[in-house]
Amino acid sequence: MALLGRLIKTALDITAQFSSIPEDPAAAQEEQLRNLLNTAKGTSFGLYYDFAGLLESEDLISAYQQSVPLFDYEQLDFHWWHRQQDAPSITWPGRPGFFALSSGTTGKTSKRIPVTDEMLEAFRSVGQSQIAALANFNLPPDMFEKDVLMLGSSADLTPYKHHLEGEISGINSQNIPGWFDGFYKPGREIAKIDNWDERVAAIAKAAPDWDVVAIAGIPSWVRMMLIKIIEVHKLETIHDLWPNLKLYASGGVAFEPHRKSFEALTSEPLIIMDTYLASEGFFAFTPRPDTMNMQLAIEHGIFFEFIPFDERGFDGTGTLLDEPEVHHLGQVVEEQDYALIVSSPAGAWRYMIGDTIKFKDLEKLEMVISGRTKYFLNVVGSQLSEEKLNAGVKYLASEIGVEISEYAVAAIKNEDGEYIHQWVLGTNKVAKCNEANLAGLLDEHLKEANKNYKVARSKALKGINVLAVEVDDIYNWLESKKKKGGQIKVPKVMKEEMMLELLENLK
């Protein structure tokens, strides 16, 4: 057993002992807000909303919520962020060195999210806490001397005005601390290859030289990479090449639909950790074994707020109310869907991420991502959230005994001009799928599980249509839109125009 591995494991054990949840999480969050306001009080945004005055308030959180409005990306970018590309100290001191280009799954163009030095430090801080949490997994000491493969976007960033830009995983890989270079794979040279297929080919070629113990990345793209490596080296499973592979850190999308396809590529079970990492911040990670819940990172520079994703915060179409209820950490309850709001050292203030989360264990501060505010299908009153859509697809996969790892749905008009729900299901066994039977099973399940859907089906929603395709056909469509690999995710709920484009491509 190597000395270095023992030393690292001992250090993790000690760090984990001092990384417990604070005694008063709500007070810890208020302190994060105080630090943010104090740092940014001299910026244009801080002067406009009188951060200095807010810091004198007896009830800081209430004063902040009453003075600063909620922002979505379009509002914050239009009024403030676009100016940071040319001038310093607009929403955060100085000028951002990077802008993260989002995946754009719910919009037509990529968003530009500022990434400051302080935001990069917050990313690193949460990452270090995640590494410290490995002490809870009873891993062998020699594991901490082996390679970690992080599959993200290209690290070849593009200069633009006064900054560099690219997807957040590419930005983070450019800013990996020097001590981690010896463990990090595929290494900076391969990570800079812009073309996804060329990068995966380079990874496959170099793979025999690595002793990979952990992999991190979005499930769909990691799966494709593993398949490529197995094909190139004529392996039965990836463990034939990397026998010490023990850990997979998932993120970006729900892992469960991909579990069976991962198990088919391995000869022994992997420890699965979930991560909540977005362009706007690293918010949560799985801190212990035997769960996919994630612990909210409340002491790493970000202040969180929560809007109930029901009639208190949103109307029946999923649109934010003019005056929604907004809760801080001390006011949330378990098993309630909340739209997540963040204020961060990137100069994001009361920024609505677009995700909904649900606390599963408040004592442990553990939560799950329950959906997207825009992944809400309600064109004709069906009121289907992403959580309900996921549950329907999971039921369908169980009933017919196939894996459905990707799906998309949209309300579109049929030949008679009436609305139907068009589903596209990505599966590994198209031949086993009777599409009419799938439509009937899914329709009946959604009627039984959701009363609003049942009412809609008796009125304006005239039918349901299912198309089953190979999952790679969906990924090929993404590639045709120059959206393959990295942080890219399949939009689960589409507008009619996008669904028609997908259907045309699948022909």
Image: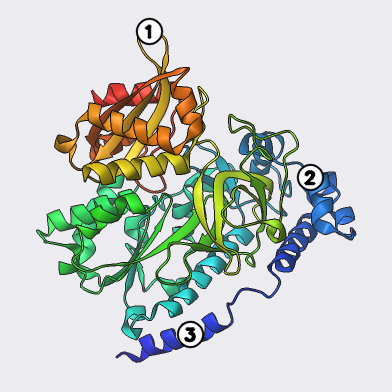
Q: Report the Cα–Cα distance between label 1 and label 3.
A: 65 Å
Q: State whether residue 11 appears in this view.
A: yes
**Within-10-Å neighbours for mark 2: few <14, some 14–19, many 20+:** some
Question: Which numbered tag is attached to residue 13?
Answer: 3
Q: Nearer the viewer, mark 1 or mark 2?
A: 1
Q: Position of residue 146 (x, y in %)?
A: 31, 76
Give the secondary structure at mark 1: loop
Left or right: where 160 falls relative to 53: left
Q: Report the Cα–Cα distance between label 1 and label 2.
A: 48 Å
Left or right: where 267 falls relative to 71: left
Give the secondary structure at mark 2: loop
**In the rendered view, how is the structure colored?**
rainbow
**Which residue is label 2 attached to?**
68
Asked whether 340 or 332 is in front, the reply is 332
Q: Position of residue 54 (x, y in %)?
A: 86, 54
Q: Nearer the viewer, mark 1 or mark 3?
A: 1
Give the secondary structure at mark 3: helix
Asked whether 169 or 214 is in front, the reply is 214
| Residue 457 placement: quadrant | top left
**Which residue is label 1 attached to?**
416
Mark 2 is on which residue type? Val
Q: Is residue 498 above or below residue 297?
A: above
Left or right: where 200 falls relative to 14: left
Q: Is residue 333 above or below residue 220?
A: below
| Residue 317 placement: quadrant | top right
Who's the residue at 55% across and 45% down the image? Answer: 355
Q: Quadrant of the N terminus?
A: bottom left
Q: State whether residue 489 appears in this view.
A: no
Who's the residue at 71% across and 35% down the image? Answer: 79
Q: Quadrant of the C terminus?
A: top left
